[in-house]
């Protein structure tokens, strides 16, 4: 361990430590001693080897000390490893930014959405705003569900915060979920065609399409999503859109929804990922953008019409008979 807390409550680095001082662990507050390794390098160690840090890594310890100094330079009055007994939690770093109390969690190990939600709820109960800084593990391997778990709202944009211990800096990564790809339709057609057997939800959707007289991968081309997006849904956007087309087929032409009913209709058809680090209002904003975009596509295709604050069904969508027919038309488009 290279970092400790001295007897005055200040951060102390091993290269500055004097043997006649008292030092304490930033994680468990137990006393530490200065030791020397066989290679002649000094380090802090616990008196007892039985102390359990729940797998805290050197990256986590180093990052916390760097973030502490970073926050201190900004005049945020940081404190390390603050115990909050009322909510039975311990903040990695607690800051006072103006009138706001802010917790910074440096996350290097895996953590479930349920655990993040529980910790965030605890902080909210104590009127503390929490930010999650991610370590190197998440920079290398960040699956879509993890993006959802750690997305924050910054300057009216969804972002992820990464702390780089090599540079000692915070990196704010905007989630570019409007990456256009001209060949994404082909990828999705292949996905719908080949991977139904190993995916229960997709298999269920394929069976539902079959009951309606359709082949899943023969859905209309306008259903395919050519943008790489923020993972609002557990399923692919194309699957949610197909579900909505099949659900619309259960209604007769000229049936209508109020705009609120239409929104609720589309929400109920999706399995929405939890976004525990952003507000309900910001999540609904992203959700509304997705719904509005799909509504405009359906309107452009003549499937629905918006009139007098009503969404009216005008006709059913036309599906392809075969994959070959669909790919032939798609290839002609891509050549243009």
Image (cartoon, rainbow, N blue to C red):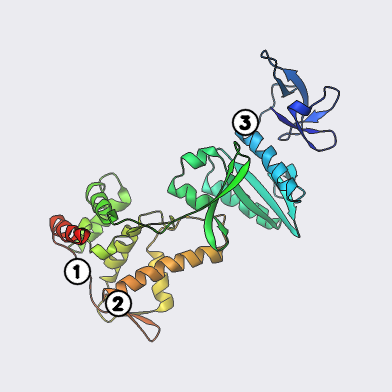
In percent of the image, x 34 and y 61: which residue is there?
240
Q: Nearer the viewer, residue 300 or 210?
A: 300
Q: CA distance from mark 1 to mark 3?
A: 58 Å
- In the image, which disc is placed on residue 304? 2
Residue 108 coordinates in the image, percent (x, y): 57, 38
First-in-chain label (2 vs 3)? 3
First-in-chain label (2 vs 1)? 2
Which residue is farthest top?
Answer: 38
Q: Is residue 331 left or right of residue 243?
A: left
How many neighbours does mark 1 have within 10 angstroms: few (below 14), some (14-19), or many (20 or more)? few
- Mark 1 and mark 3 residues within 8 Å of each other at the beta carbon: no
- Mark 2 and mark 1 residues within 8 Å of each other at the beta carbon: no
Q: Nearer the viewer, residue 148 or 122?
A: 148
Residue 152 coordinates in the image, percent (x, y): 56, 55
- Quadrant, the N terminus: top right
How many neighbours does mark 3 have within 10 angstroms: few (below 14), some (14-19), or many (20 or more)? few
Q: CA distance from mark 2 to mark 3?
A: 57 Å
Label 3, on which residue? Answer: 58
Q: Is residue 50 left or right of residue 132?
A: right
Of labels 1 and 3, the one closer to you: 3
Residue 56, quarter of the rendered image? top right
Residue 36 coordinates in the image, percent (x, y): 72, 17
Label 1, on which residue? Answer: 318
Q: Compared to 79, does 237 lie above or below? A: below
In percent of the image, x 70 and y 58: which residue is there?
127
Residue 301 coordinates in the image, percent (x, y): 26, 73
First-in-chain label (1 vs 3)? 3
Tag 2 secondary structure: strand
Residue 224, quarter of the rendered image? bottom left
In percent of the image, x 62 and y 51: which residue is there?
131
Q: Is residue 29 visible?
A: yes
């Amino acid at each position: 361990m290279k970092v400790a807390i001295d007897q005055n409550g200040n951060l102390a680095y091993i290269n500055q430590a004097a043997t006649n001082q008292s030092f304490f662990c930033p994680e468990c507050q137990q006393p530490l001693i200065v030791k020397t390794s066989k290679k002649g390098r000094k380090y802090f160690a616990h008196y007892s080897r039985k102390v359990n840090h729940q797998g805290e890594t050197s990256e986590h310890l180093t990052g916390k000390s760097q973030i502490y100094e970073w926050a201190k330079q900004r005049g945020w009055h940081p404190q390390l490893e603050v115990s909050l007994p009322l909510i039975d939690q311990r903040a990695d770093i607690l800051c006072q930014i103006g009138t706001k109390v802010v917790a910074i969690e440096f996350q290097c190990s895996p953590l479930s959405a349920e655990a993040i939600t529980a910790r965030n709820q605890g902080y909210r109960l104590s009127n503390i705003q929490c930010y999650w800084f991610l370590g190197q593990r998440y920079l290398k391997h960040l699956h879509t569900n993890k993006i959802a778990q750690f997305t924050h709202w910054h300057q009216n944009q969804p972002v992820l915060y990464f702390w780089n211990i090599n540079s000692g800096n915070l990196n704010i990564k905007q989630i570019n979920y409007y990456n256009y790809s001209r060949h994404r339709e082909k990828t999705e057609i292949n996905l719908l065609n080949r991977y139904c057997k190993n995916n229960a939800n997709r298999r269920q959707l394929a069976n539902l399409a079959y009951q309606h007289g359709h082949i899943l991968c023969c859905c209309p081309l306008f259903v395919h999503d050519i943008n790489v997006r923020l993972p609002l849904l557990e399923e692919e956007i194309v699957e949610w859109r197909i579900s909505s087309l099949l659900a619309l087929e259960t209604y007769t032409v000229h049936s209508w929804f109020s705009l609120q009913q239409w929104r609720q209709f589309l929400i109920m058809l999706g399995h929405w990922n939890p976004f525990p680090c952003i507000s309900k209002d910001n999540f609904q904003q992203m959700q509304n953008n997705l719904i509005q975009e799909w509504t405009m596509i359906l309107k452009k295709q003549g499937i629905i019409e918006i009139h007098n604050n009503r969404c009216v069904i005008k006709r059913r969508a036309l599906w392809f008979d075969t994959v070959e027919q669909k790919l032939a038309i798609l290839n002609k488009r891509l050549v243009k």
